[in-house]
Image: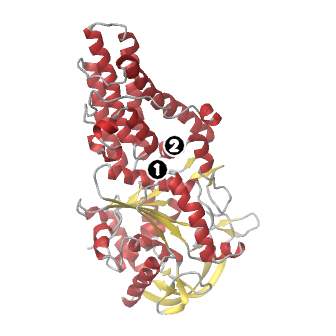
Amino acid sequence: MVATGSDRHSTRTYYVSTPIYYVNDAPHLGHAYTTVAGDVLTRWHRQRGENVWFLTGTDEHGQKIMRTAAANGVTPKEWCDKLVEEAWRPLWAHLNIANDDFIRTTESRHTARVQEFIQDLHDKGEIYKGGYQGPYCVGCEEYKLPGELAEGDDGAQLCPIHRKPVEILKEENYFFKLSEYGPKLLEHYENHPDFIHPASARNEVVNFVKQGLQDLSVSRSTFDWGIKVPWDDKHVIYVWIDALLNYATAVGYGSDSAMFEETFPADVHLVGKDILRFHAIIWPAMLMANNLPLPGRIAANGWLLVGGEKMSKSNLTGIKPQGLTEHFGVDAYRWYFLRAIAFGQDGSFSWEDFTARYTSELANDYGNLASRLAAMVIKYFAGVLPKATAAGEAERVVQEGLANAVAAADRKIGEELDFAGGIAVVFDFIKQVNGYLTEQEPWKVAKDDSEEGRARLATILYTAADALRGCAVLLNPLMPQSSQELWNSLGADASLGVLAGQRIQDAGDWGRLPAGSEVTKGQALFPRLEDRTRA
């Protein structure tokens, strides 16, 4: 029986990976979308109090890298070094990505272990030598089946993803006996219905495997930019075999048995749907062949579309994230794509939609609520959070709303990978708190100087403040900068400790923000866009 990530006991590390990204050019919104999703998911689980490992990195071998480097007059390694250090690492730092490791497939900790893995497969009789001829897309680094190709206006056969002509390659390669693993894979999909997410992706993979699998070419002999096949140095290991193994080599495969045992396999592999088959078919088959446990879940996000087409470096439709963060800010950027696009579905980026959502939800609903609350505590109680002594039904409803929001958001984001649904739950609660203030009218209650009036005013403001305390905890994985600003504004850092140490599951416990906390009013959490532009 093959073990899976879902079978692991709860003390193991929660391990999430992004794909390792191909460094033929600078990153665009599509890469950032997947990486931000991984960052939010792992920050969420850290705030559950779990041990977490978040891996990302770069894929640096293969024919496409070799050609790109040659076109730029440098060696493949020089090209990769430049892109990694000048584009990829800086962007993840800019977007507040808190990855635990960044692996490059040109690193010795990876290359040596890949050779060990492929040698093991060879020694077990899982790999044989043969010849192959077929249509090959350099952009995908993949042989295509005839039925997968599109036809261009001139009759040329095109890759359906890159919309560029395929090349007909003929070479002698080594092959992995992938065809033998179809029944085992189907059995695993049946026994683990959540292995592939979402259901549409699962159905696609199941139908593909049911049609019958072909053995997989795992080496190339027509170029040399790759990891040498250990028993035949005239061949290099197929870049996708090389790339998939990063999920094992980065956590100690063949080098650190304690870390490998604690961390592997991944609980969640986040991937784009265009590389789903590599992760949901080839990767588990390779692991089965070497008797290693399978990951818990392969989660495929959809495409970000520009003009109805997939965002792509190759098609020159890639948009740099910095073009949006300069206008909207990093937190809003992290928020928007996970809020506006259901994870697993395609979604079109729209500047107009981003602007409308930012104004309505971030600036008006959330940011304005925080500003109003701070201003009233300062005005009516000299900035000292008062004690709630006159709570009634209206306050009970808010308390219940927070508890429900915490439970629903934790389930949706932490378990179901429904980022849009989880974020919507929190912002529905923010709307509820705004409605509570509108109905209770603290600015009118403040005119009543009686003891009862002051008690009622104190209760209203405390209720809104503790509700915002819960929102800061829930939104911290998504928007760490603004959440920290709100946390500071509420005086929670001094009274409750660091925000990152607040457990998600405790966020709904009412009354955690102590009376007497010093409330301050800083800059707007989300300035209006015209103000941000002028600044």
Q: Please say whether residue 479 is visible from this viewpoint.
A: no
Task: Tell me if residue 233 comes above or below residue 143 in the rendering.
Answer: below
Rounded to the nearest angstrom, the CA distance separating label 2 from label 1 is 12 Å
Number of on-image labels: 2
Residue at the image position 31 percent from the left and 71 percent from the top = 259
Task: Tell me if residue 143 comes above or below residue 453 in the rendering.
Answer: below
- Image-quadrant location for residue 202: bottom left
Residue nearest the viewer, comparing 444 with 440: 444
Color encoding of the figure: secondary structure
Secondary structure, mark 2, is helix
- Image-quadrant location for residue 261: bottom left
Residue nearest the viewer, comparing 76 with 165: 76
- Image-quadrant location for residue 366: top left
Crowd tier of the residue under label 2, counting other residues whose Cα lies within 10 Å: few below 14, some 14–19, many 20 or above:
many
Instruction: Please state the horizontal and vertical placement of residue 289, each as a whole percent of the image.
Output: 36, 80
Q: Which residue is mark 1?
A: 343
Secondary structure, mark 1, is loop
For marks 2 and 1 on the same chain, the one whose residue lies earlier in the sequence: 2
Amino acid type of the residue that numbered disc 1 sits on in the rendered structure: Phe
